[in-house]
Image (cartoon, rainbow, N blue to C red):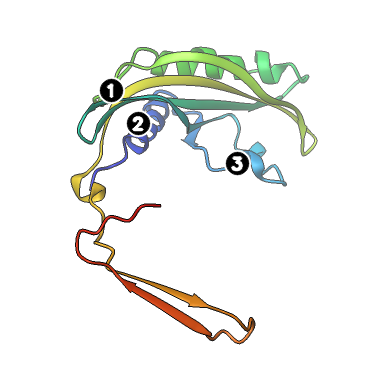
Protein backbone atom coordinates (compact mmCIF):
# COMPACT_ATOMS: atom_id res chain seq x y z
CA UNK A 1 0.00 0.00 0.00
CA UNK A 2 1.36 3.42 -0.95
CA UNK A 3 1.72 6.21 1.57
CA UNK A 4 -0.30 9.31 0.78
CA UNK A 5 1.93 11.98 -0.79
CA UNK A 6 -0.25 14.63 0.88
CA UNK A 7 0.52 13.10 4.28
CA UNK A 8 4.26 12.96 3.55
CA UNK A 9 4.33 16.57 2.36
CA UNK A 10 2.37 17.91 5.35
CA UNK A 11 4.59 15.99 7.78
CA UNK A 12 7.75 17.31 6.04
CA UNK A 13 6.45 20.89 6.22
CA UNK A 14 5.75 20.54 9.96
CA UNK A 15 9.20 18.99 10.58
CA UNK A 16 11.03 21.71 8.61
CA UNK A 17 9.18 24.54 10.36
CA UNK A 18 9.76 22.94 13.80
CA UNK A 19 13.47 22.57 13.13
CA UNK A 20 13.86 26.16 11.92
CA UNK A 21 11.60 27.75 14.56
CA UNK A 22 12.23 25.90 17.85
CA UNK A 23 10.65 28.66 19.98
CA UNK A 24 7.32 28.53 18.12
CA UNK A 25 4.75 25.75 18.44
CA UNK A 26 4.37 24.07 15.02
CA UNK A 27 1.84 21.28 14.39
CA UNK A 28 -0.69 19.95 11.91
CA UNK A 29 -3.98 21.79 12.05
CA UNK A 30 -6.61 19.75 13.87
CA UNK A 31 -9.48 22.19 14.31
CA UNK A 32 -7.79 24.27 17.01
CA UNK A 33 -9.69 27.41 15.97
CA UNK A 34 -13.02 25.59 16.41
CA UNK A 35 -12.50 25.27 20.17
CA UNK A 36 -15.30 27.30 21.77
CA UNK A 37 -13.13 27.96 24.84
CA UNK A 38 -10.25 29.34 22.73
CA UNK A 39 -7.72 27.00 24.39
CA UNK A 40 -5.42 27.65 21.43
CA UNK A 41 -4.80 31.15 22.81
CA UNK A 42 -2.66 29.63 25.60
CA UNK A 43 -0.23 28.14 23.06
CA UNK A 44 0.65 31.22 20.98
CA UNK A 45 2.65 32.04 18.95
CA UNK A 46 2.12 29.03 16.73
CA UNK A 47 2.03 27.78 13.16
CA UNK A 48 -0.47 25.19 11.92
CA UNK A 49 -0.06 23.28 8.65
CA UNK A 50 -2.87 21.69 6.66
CA UNK A 51 -3.71 20.47 3.17
CA UNK A 52 -6.26 22.66 1.39
CA UNK A 53 -6.95 21.01 -1.97
CA UNK A 54 -5.59 19.65 -5.22
CA UNK A 55 -5.53 22.43 -7.81
CA UNK A 56 -4.74 20.26 -10.85
CA UNK A 57 -4.29 16.61 -11.80
CA UNK A 58 -2.77 15.30 -15.05
CA UNK A 59 -2.63 11.66 -16.01
CA UNK A 60 0.95 10.69 -16.88
CA UNK A 61 0.51 6.91 -17.19
CA UNK A 62 -1.56 3.98 -16.06
CA UNK A 63 -2.47 4.64 -12.41
CA UNK A 64 0.04 7.56 -12.31
CA UNK A 65 -0.96 11.19 -11.90
CA UNK A 66 0.95 14.45 -11.62
CA UNK A 67 -0.94 16.41 -8.96
CA UNK A 68 -0.51 19.98 -7.75
CA UNK A 69 -1.53 20.37 -4.13
CA UNK A 70 -2.14 23.51 -2.13
CA UNK A 71 -1.19 23.57 1.54
CA UNK A 72 -1.90 26.28 4.10
CA UNK A 73 0.42 27.50 6.84
CA UNK A 74 -1.56 29.43 9.44
CA UNK A 75 0.22 31.66 11.92
CA UNK A 76 -1.40 32.86 15.14
CA UNK A 77 -0.22 35.41 17.70
CA UNK A 78 -1.69 37.19 20.71
CA UNK A 79 -1.04 40.80 21.69
CA UNK A 80 1.11 41.61 24.69
CA UNK A 81 0.41 45.30 24.06
CA UNK A 82 -2.18 47.16 21.99
CA UNK A 83 -4.14 45.03 19.46
CA UNK A 84 -2.01 45.93 16.39
CA UNK A 85 0.96 44.15 17.97
CA UNK A 86 -0.67 40.82 17.04
CA UNK A 87 -0.01 41.71 13.41
CA UNK A 88 2.93 44.11 13.60
CA UNK A 89 4.90 42.74 16.52
CA UNK A 90 6.39 44.79 19.31
CA UNK A 91 6.71 44.62 23.07
CA UNK A 92 9.28 41.85 22.60
CA UNK A 93 7.10 39.59 20.46
CA UNK A 94 7.03 38.58 16.83
CA UNK A 95 3.89 39.64 14.93
CA UNK A 96 1.77 37.37 12.78
CA UNK A 97 3.10 39.16 9.65
CA UNK A 98 6.62 38.10 10.59
CA UNK A 99 5.51 34.54 11.38
CA UNK A 100 4.04 34.13 7.90
CA UNK A 101 5.93 36.54 5.65
CA UNK A 102 9.41 36.06 7.06
CA UNK A 103 9.76 32.88 9.06
CA UNK A 104 7.50 30.46 7.14
CA UNK A 105 8.57 31.89 3.78
CA UNK A 106 12.27 31.56 4.67
CA UNK A 107 11.77 27.86 5.50
CA UNK A 108 9.50 26.82 2.61
CA UNK A 109 10.15 29.01 -0.45
CA UNK A 110 11.75 27.05 -3.32
CA UNK A 111 12.32 24.01 -1.07
CA UNK A 112 11.65 20.30 -1.69
CA UNK A 113 12.14 19.28 1.97
CA UNK A 114 13.92 16.08 0.94
CA UNK A 115 10.91 14.79 -1.01
CA UNK A 116 10.46 14.00 -4.70
CA UNK A 117 8.30 17.07 -5.31
CA UNK A 118 8.62 20.36 -7.16
CA UNK A 119 9.90 23.23 -4.99
CA UNK A 120 7.23 25.04 -2.98
CA UNK A 121 5.80 28.22 -4.49
CA UNK A 122 3.93 30.80 -2.37
CA UNK A 123 0.37 31.44 -3.61
CA UNK A 124 -0.90 34.29 -1.46
CA UNK A 125 -1.56 35.33 2.09
CA UNK A 126 -4.84 36.23 3.78
CA UNK A 127 -6.07 37.27 7.19
CA UNK A 128 -8.14 34.43 8.65
CA UNK A 129 -9.38 36.28 11.72
CA UNK A 130 -8.42 38.96 14.18
CA UNK A 131 -10.07 40.31 17.27
CA UNK A 132 -10.60 39.41 20.91
CA UNK A 133 -10.83 35.81 22.09
CA UNK A 134 -11.19 35.01 25.78
CA UNK A 135 -10.61 38.74 26.44
CA UNK A 136 -7.24 38.73 24.65
CA UNK A 137 -6.40 40.18 21.24
CA UNK A 138 -5.15 37.72 18.62
CA UNK A 139 -4.67 37.48 14.88
CA UNK A 140 -4.48 34.46 12.56
CA UNK A 141 -3.11 34.68 9.02
CA UNK A 142 -2.76 31.98 6.39
CA UNK A 143 -0.21 31.57 3.63
CA UNK A 144 -0.87 29.22 0.69
CA UNK A 145 1.91 27.03 -0.71
CA UNK A 146 1.79 24.82 -3.80
CA UNK A 147 3.91 21.93 -4.96
CA UNK A 148 3.58 19.28 -7.65
CA UNK A 149 4.10 15.60 -6.90
CA UNK A 150 3.60 12.18 -8.47
CA UNK A 151 0.57 10.31 -7.16
CA UNK A 152 0.71 6.58 -7.90
CA UNK A 153 -2.30 4.33 -7.27
CA UNK A 154 -1.31 0.90 -5.91
CA UNK A 155 -2.35 -1.85 -8.35
CA UNK A 156 -3.98 -3.84 -5.52
CA UNK A 157 -6.06 -0.81 -4.51
CA UNK A 158 -7.23 -0.28 -8.10
CA UNK A 159 -8.52 -3.85 -8.55
CA UNK A 160 -12.17 -4.45 -7.66
CA UNK A 161 -12.53 -6.71 -4.60
CA UNK A 162 -14.57 -9.35 -6.40
CA UNK A 163 -17.07 -10.16 -9.08
CA UNK A 164 -20.78 -9.51 -8.54
CA UNK A 165 -22.51 -12.91 -8.73
CA UNK A 166 -25.85 -12.51 -6.96
CA UNK A 167 -28.27 -9.66 -6.34
CA UNK A 168 -30.92 -9.98 -3.64
CA UNK A 169 -33.88 -7.65 -3.14
CA UNK A 170 -36.08 -7.70 -0.02
CA UNK A 171 -39.53 -6.10 -0.13
CA UNK A 172 -41.20 -4.74 3.00
CA UNK A 173 -44.92 -4.63 2.24
CA UNK A 174 -45.89 -4.39 5.92
CA UNK A 175 -43.48 -1.83 7.40
CA UNK A 176 -42.32 -2.09 10.98
CA UNK A 177 -41.96 -5.85 11.46
CA UNK A 178 -38.37 -6.01 10.07
CA UNK A 179 -39.31 -9.11 8.08
CA UNK A 180 -39.21 -9.22 4.26
CA UNK A 181 -42.65 -9.92 2.78
CA UNK A 182 -41.21 -10.88 -0.61
CA UNK A 183 -37.71 -11.70 -1.87
CA UNK A 184 -36.16 -11.69 -5.36
CA UNK A 185 -32.74 -13.25 -6.00
CA UNK A 186 -30.99 -12.90 -9.36
CA UNK A 187 -27.91 -14.99 -10.11
CA UNK A 188 -25.69 -13.60 -12.87
CA UNK A 189 -23.72 -15.62 -15.36
CA UNK A 190 -19.94 -15.10 -15.20
CA UNK A 191 -18.73 -12.06 -17.17
CA UNK A 192 -22.27 -10.66 -17.48
CA UNK A 193 -22.27 -6.89 -17.98
CA UNK A 194 -24.81 -4.88 -16.02
CA UNK A 195 -26.00 -1.65 -17.58
CA UNK A 196 -27.65 1.01 -15.52
Q: Which residue is mark 2?
A: 9
Tell me which label, 3 or 2, sits earlier in the chain.
2
Tell me which label, 1 or 2, sits earlier in the chain.
2
Q: Please report contact status of discs 3 and 2: CB closer than 8 Å, yes or no.
A: no
Residue 56 visible from this viewpoint: yes
Give residue 51's position: percent from left, percent from top: 46, 32
> Quarter of the image holding residue 69?
top left
Give residue 62's position: percent from left, percent from top: 20, 33
> Quarter of the image holding residue 38?
top right
Q: Please report contact status of discs 1 and 2: CB closer than 8 Å, yes or no.
A: yes
Residue located at (48% from left, 17% from top): 103
Q: Which residue is mark 1?
A: 117
Q: Is residue 64 left or right of residue 136?
A: left
Residue located at (27% from left, 55% from top): 193
Towards the viewer: 94 or 123: 123
Towards the viewer: 70 or 161: 161
Q: Which residue is mark 3?
A: 32
Residue 93 visible from this viewpoint: no
Give residue 99's position: percent from left, percent from top: 54, 19
Mark 3 Cα-neighbour bin, 10 Å: few <14, some 14–19, many ≥20? few
Amino acid sequence: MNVSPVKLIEEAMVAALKAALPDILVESYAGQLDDEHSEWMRRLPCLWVTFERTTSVKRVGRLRYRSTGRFQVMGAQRALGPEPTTRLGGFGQVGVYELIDLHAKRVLADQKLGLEIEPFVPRGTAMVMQGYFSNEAAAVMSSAWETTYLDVVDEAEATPPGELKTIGLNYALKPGDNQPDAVDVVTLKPNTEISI
